[in-house]
Amino acid sequence: MEENLVELDSKKINQRYVYRFFKRLGDIILSLLALFPVVLILTIVALFIKLDDGGPVFFTQTRVGKNGKPFKIFKVRSMRTDAEKILPNLRKYNQVSGPMFKMKDDPRITRVGRFIRKYSIDELPQLINVLKGDMSLVGPRPGLPSEVKEYTDYAKQRLYVLPGCTGLWQATDRSNTDFDGMINLDLHYIQNASIWLDLKIIFLTFKVMIVPNGAY
């Protein structure tokens, strides 16, 4: 699938000064506007998580951002506290090709976790990452360091821009496509990025939060 897309020019992407300015401005304004309702939602979710297994509500994880720079991502915990220890035993059940791990009935996910992942509530704390400048509201999914180590040069092109809380992959095919499909959607977005496309993806994201598109 990779050879079907042209290679991106990182210099031209970084020279989109007007777009990058308004994108950053929009990130800040929309994130600040969303903070109050997000805090209310997370307060309720936190209560259910504590009642479910009593573990921590939030967790941080190292992800890879723009130009390969690592950063700490903020998320609501949707898995058991020993999820990382269990993962090696589940690798053989991976349902997608490439370095990304996806398993529909992942036993690591808690009861509350299944609900919040279905409606993408676990991603809401990433507004903090957006305000810090680690992420944008719209962009490619930030990969784990172990995933990025396995990227081809073609896949590494998705690191030309800030990763996003949502993106073309998340708002459309999400769990219904493989790793190569995700990469192609990300590169299509980077190649055609505009304020209007960002707004369209944000709109589609709200839509799939109400009517989930198979997230797990």
Image: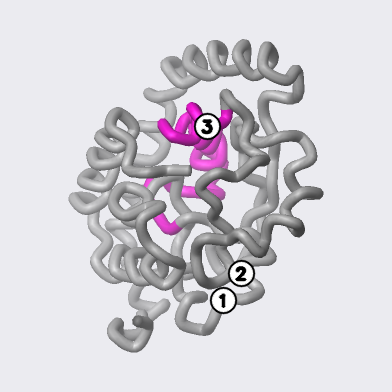
117 left or right, relative to 138 = right
Single out the mark in the foreground, 3 or 1.
3
What residue is shown at x 21% (from left), y 46% (from top)?
Answer: 200
Question: Which range is magenta?
Answer: 113-140
What residue is shown at x 62% (from left), y 36% (from top)?
Answer: 109
Single out the mark in the foreground, 3 or 2.
3
For the image, the number of numbered tags is 3
* Residue designated by label 2: 148
* Residue designated by label 1: 151
> From what the image shows, is residue 88 above or below residue 114?
below
Front in this rendered view, residue 122 or 33: 122
> From what the image shows, is residue 71 above or below residue 205?
below
Front in this rendered view, residue 109 or 36: 109
Q: Position of residue 22 (x, y in %)?
A: 30, 48
* N-term mark: 3 or 2: 3
Task: Kindly check if marks 3 and 1 are in contact, taking CB atoms under 8 A apart as contact.
Answer: no
Q: CA distance from mark 3 to mark 2?
A: 26 Å
Task: Kindly identify the amino acid type of the residue bearing the numbered disc 3.
Answer: Arg
Q: Which part of the image, by quadrant, shows the N terminus?
A: bottom left
181 left or right, relative to 74 = left
* Residue designated by label 3: 114
Q: How is the image coloured?
A: one colour
What residue is shown at x 29% (from left), y 71% (from top)?
Answer: 191
Task: Kindly identify the amino acid type of the residue bearing the numbered disc 2.
Answer: Val
Q: Position of residue 13 (x, y in %)?
A: 36, 71
Dot 2 alpha-carbon crowd within 10 angstroms: few under 14, some 14 to 19, many 20 or more = some
Where, by quadrant of the figure, is residue 79 drawn?
top right
Task: Kindly check if marks 2 and 1 are in contact, taking CB atoms under 8 A apart as contact.
Answer: yes
Q: Is residue 116 visible?
A: yes
Q: CA distance from mark 2 to mark 1?
A: 5 Å
> From what the image shows, is residue 144 above or below residue 108?
below
